[in-house]
Image (cartoon, rainbow, N blue to C red):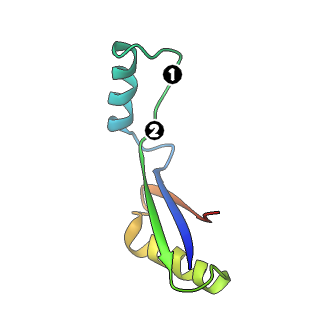
Amino acid sequence: MARVIVDVMLKPEILDPQGQAIARALPRLGFSGVAAVRQGKRFEVDLDGPADEAALDEVRKMAETLLANTVIEDYSVRVEG
């Protein structure tokens, strides 16, 4: 069994109001030195078999079809461990 991680983030040119709200709240909570925050999503996909290239291609298809809105989001796929 293998675990594949799919990280989804808004594209850099897309406004991230949630990340901006977090960045504004940090100084009020005593955290300093943070210039910006971008918020995203992480998906953990457990595969029945090994994380070979065919399985990773399937996970990429999952990301493009369901996990990410590729118009406004980028995604990356990696094997954990």
Give the amino acid at mark 2: Arg
Disc 2 crowd rating (10 Å Cα; few below 14, some 14-19, many 20+) is some
Under mark 1, the amino acid is Val
What's the distance in space between the residues labelled 1 and 2, CA to CA? 11 Å
Above or below, 74 against 61 in this view is above
Name the residue rendered at 47%, 51% in the picture: 9
Disc 2 secondary structure class = loop
Provide residue 46's location: percent of width, then percent of height.
48, 74
Task: Note whether 34 is above or below 51 in the view shown.
Answer: above
- Name the residue that disc number 1 marks: 34
Residue labelled with disc 2: 38
| Category of crowding for the residue at label 1, using alpha-carbon neighbours closer than 10 angstroms: few (below 14), some (14–19), many (at least 20) | few
Q: Is residue 77 above or below residue 72?
A: below
Query: Regarding mark 1 in the picture, which secondary structure is present there?
Result: loop
- The answer to whether marks 1 and 2 mark residues whose Cβ atoms lie closer than 8 Å is no
Q: Residue at x 45, y 38 (%)?
A: 38
Q: Nearer the viewer, residue 29 or 72?
A: 29
Query: 41 or 14, which lies in front?
Result: 41
Splitting the image into 4 quarters, where does residue 28 fall? top left
Residue 53 percent location from the top left of the image: 67, 82
Which residue is outermost to the front? 1
Marking on residue 80: none
